């Protein structure tokens, strides 16, 4: 069964779309699992706490990157691969692309090393389809909560680099870019159209 991921900068509306997809799959009687990153496993959720804790403002970019990769390695080996092997449809709320965009471009660690370490962490498990909800500066600023977590409190300059990262990634064939200013229903119709054209249930 397929592995589908959702990507985009904070406030892009991923969660709404994932909820809608969840209801769609339930109605169709398709077995599925949804995991969020960082997290999704017991160990991963502990790593998530460290990563998003605002008191950890002195975390080095390399530490941050390796913690995301560690959470991902655990998730893939212990949860995602077993689910895929039993034939479930797996949805990931963020995956490798988030690390390429946030750590590779945002933190300027470079895409090469980020991809390499992530391929090691996941044994080269790539998604079949990735929905990227694109957001512009104005919408981003409007949607941004004033007191978010450690990652959300990064400024616009950081987010601009992250967006550049997603622009680079969106050239890949598995990427489907959607304008997040569209109404949630319109976005969802588009997502379903893509899913139905890629996979037969
Ligand atoms: P979360 O509250 O789950 O945000 P969202 O709802 O936007 O997904 O927090 C995840 C944060 O971690 C988000 O700001 C993006 C960041 N992140 C990375 O920097 N690198 C990664 O590899 C992943 C998975 C997330």
Image: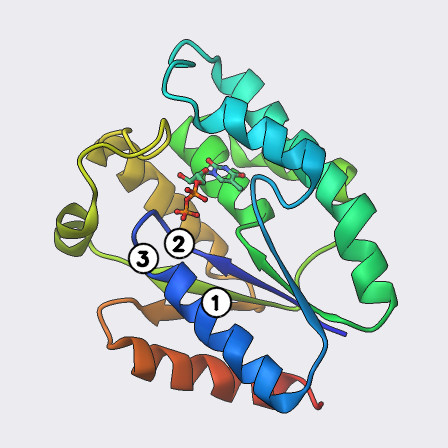
Q: Is residue 162 left or right of residue 18?
A: left
Instruction: Answer yes or no: disc 3 within 8 Å of ligand 1.
Output: yes
Q: Residue 56 in the image: state x and y as whole percent.
A: 43, 14
**Relative to 186, is 94 on the left or the right?**
right
Give the mark toward the camera: 3 or 1: 1
Residue 12: image tag? 3
Confirm or deny contact between disc 1 and disc 2 (CB under 8 A). no
Mark 2 = which residue? Answer: 8
Q: Earlier in the sequence, mark 1 or mark 2?
A: 2
Ligand 1: quadrant of the figure? top left
When the figure is inspected, residue 54 is found, relative to residue 143, above or below; the finding is above
Q: Which mark is residue 18?
A: 1
Front: mark 1 or 2: 1
Q: Is mark 2 within 8 Å of ligand 1?
A: yes
Q: Residue 28: where, in percent of width, then height?
A: 62, 90
Q: Quadrant of the N terminus?
A: bottom right
Can the viewer see residue 127?
Answer: yes
Spot the residue most to the top: 58
Q: Secondary structure at mark 2?
A: loop
Please say if 38 is above or below 187.
above
């Amino acid at each position: 069964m397929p592995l589908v991921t959702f990507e985009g900068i904070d406030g892009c509306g991923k969660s709404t779309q994932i909820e809608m997809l969840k209801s769609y799959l339930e109605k169709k009687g398709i077995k599925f699992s949804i995991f969020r990153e960082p997290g999704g496993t017991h160990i991963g959720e502990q790593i998530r706490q460290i990563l998003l804790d605002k008191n950890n403002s002195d975390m080095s970019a390399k530490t941050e990157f390796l913690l995301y990769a560690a959470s991902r390695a655990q998730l893939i080996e212990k949860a995602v691969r077993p689910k895929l092997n039993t034939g479930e449809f797996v949805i990931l709320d963020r995956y490798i692309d988030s690390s390429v965009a946030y750590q590779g471009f945002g933190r300027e660690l470079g895409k090469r090393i980020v991809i390499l370490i992530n391929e090691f962490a996941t044994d080269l498990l790539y998604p079949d389809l990735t929905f990227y909800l694109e957001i512009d500066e104005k919408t981003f600023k409007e949607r941004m909560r004033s007191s978010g977590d450690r990652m959300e409190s990064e400024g616009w300059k950081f987010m601009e680099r992250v967006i550049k990262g997603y622009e680079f990634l969106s050239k890949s064939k598995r990427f489907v870019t959607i304008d997040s200013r569209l109404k949630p229903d319109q976005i969802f119709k588009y997502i379903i159209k893509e899913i139905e054209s890629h996979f037969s249930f």
